[in-house]
Structure formats: C-alpha cells, structure tokens
Amino acid sequence: MYERILAVGDIHGEWDKFLSLYRQLDFNPEKDLLVFLGDYIDRGARSMDALIWMYEHRQEKAIIMLRGNHEQMMLDYYDTNGQDDIWLQNGGDITADALASLDGGTQRLYLDFVRSLPLAHHLRANNRDYFFCHAGVDPAVPLDEQAPETLLWIRERFFDHYTGETIVVAGHTNTAYIEPLTPLPIIRRNMILVDTGSYMHYGHISCVDVLSGRIWQDC
C-alpha cells in the first residue's frame, strides 16, 4: 500500500505557492498517492498555469485530481454560452481571459479535461476508510449516494454535523472560518479539512498526509 496519501487543498491560481508546496513534498509516485481536492483555478493570477500542470499530469496513476466547485462553475458557464455567469462573479474572469487567448481546439481540450475529473474518490488504507471530495458530504445520505451539488458546495451541514466513521477529506471552506483564525488544516477523528485560504493575503496552500497527520504548507 502507500507510504503516504497526500491531500492538497484549494490552489486557486496561486502558482508560486503551489510550486513552493510541491517541492517540499518530495512526491514519490512509486510509494505515495497524491490527491488534489479541486479548485485549481480562479482568483489567483496564474490559474492557467495550475490548470496546465494538472492537464499535463492527468495520466499519472499515483495522482488523483478531483473537480471543485470553481471547475464546475467554469463548465456551467461555457455549457450555457455565458448565460450562467456566476463563475465570472467569483474570480472566474481571470481564468476566462486566459482561456479566451487560446484557439478553440485548445480551449475545448482543457474543458474536456475538467469535465472528466471525478467528484469523489474512496479508498481503504491501514484499516480505515477515506472519502475524498471537494466540499464534504451530507451526513444524512450514504457516501455512495451523495449528490454532485453536495460534493461541490456543502459547508456547515457537513463539518458541523458529520458523525460517520469514514474519514472525509475535503477542501472548499477556509479552515479559518471554521476555527477562527487558524492558519492550518483541521484534523478531526472523522474528517480532514485542507483549504487554508490560498488566495488570501494570510493564506496558504496546504497538504496533509492523511495516514500520519503531517502537514506541509507553502513558504
């Protein structure tokens, strides 16, 4: 099995922070599993760099990339020919401008890649079950029946009320909003929350080895 299972929180186009974090991980695809929890794009100035990196690593078996709500908003925008423009109001204008500079075929290449990203990943390691998703889960619904909207958008109902035994690993909600002003991921008995506000002036991109609880952040 894996020596480390590394879960990386929201990147949001903070390319320099991502590179700083990634170099520290010393990721070994022969021994490790690397799980990205979504929201690679928007808000940060170098969203396209993050998207390109994910695309270029899409076939690596030791890397799992999940879809976040910002990737979903992007798809909804293009699928409706711009009618569903909530994406642009949430930092998507930066990514949209970058995509607009590409030819149509290349643009479709990246959109099809994002469309292929799964919403969740479930595995068992060291006699524990782990469920990875972007936002969290509805405590009243079995894990294999979670609605896409829940996996992409849920907040308080998940982290205030989930009591299951499976460890849910998620991003989406800045941990400083859950435990005021904490700069670190939150590790509880049955959940690991990894979004530490990458695009904010005090924020970081964080990674947690879900097996050991070790934390890395950009510096």
Image (cartoon, rainbow, N blue to C red):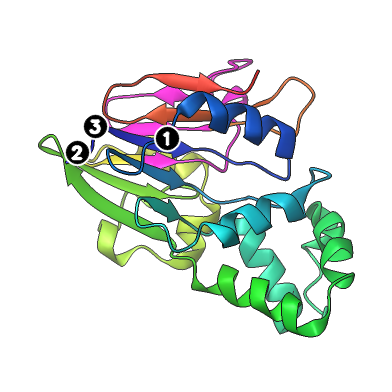
| Residue 185 falls within the magenta-colored stretch | yes
- As helix, strand or loop, the secondary structure at mark 1 comes to loop
Q: In this view, does 31 lie to the left or right of 52?
A: left
Residue 65 visible to an observer of this rendering: yes
Q: Mark 1 points at which residue?
A: 27
Q: Distance between the residues labelled 2 and 1?
A: 28 Å
Q: Mark 3 points at which residue?
A: 3
Question: Residue 52 versus residue 5: which sits nearer the camera?
Answer: 52
Can you say which quadrant of the picture contains the C terminus?
top right
| Residue 167 falls within the magenta-colored stretch | no
Q: Nearer the viewer, mark 2 or mark 3?
A: 3
Question: Residue 68 versus residue 116: which sits nearer the camera?
Answer: 116
List x then y, in percent, for residue 28.
37, 37
From the viewer's perspective, is residue 179 above or below residue 156?
Answer: above
Amino acid type, mark 3? Glu
Q: Which residue is drawn at 55% across and 29% down?
A: 23
Q: How far apart are marks 2 and 3 (CA)?
A: 22 Å
What numbered label is drawn on residue 83?
A: none
Q: Residue at x 56, y 22 (%)?
A: 217
Q: Which of marks 2 and 1 is in front?
A: 1
Q: Earlier in the sequence, mark 2 or mark 3?
A: 3
Question: Residue 149 versus residue 25: which sits nearer the camera?
Answer: 25
Q: Is residue 208 left or right of residue 24?
A: left
Magenta residues, start to end: 169-194
* Disc 3: CA contacts within 10 A as few (<14), some (14-19) or many (>=20): some
Amino acid type, mark 1? Phe
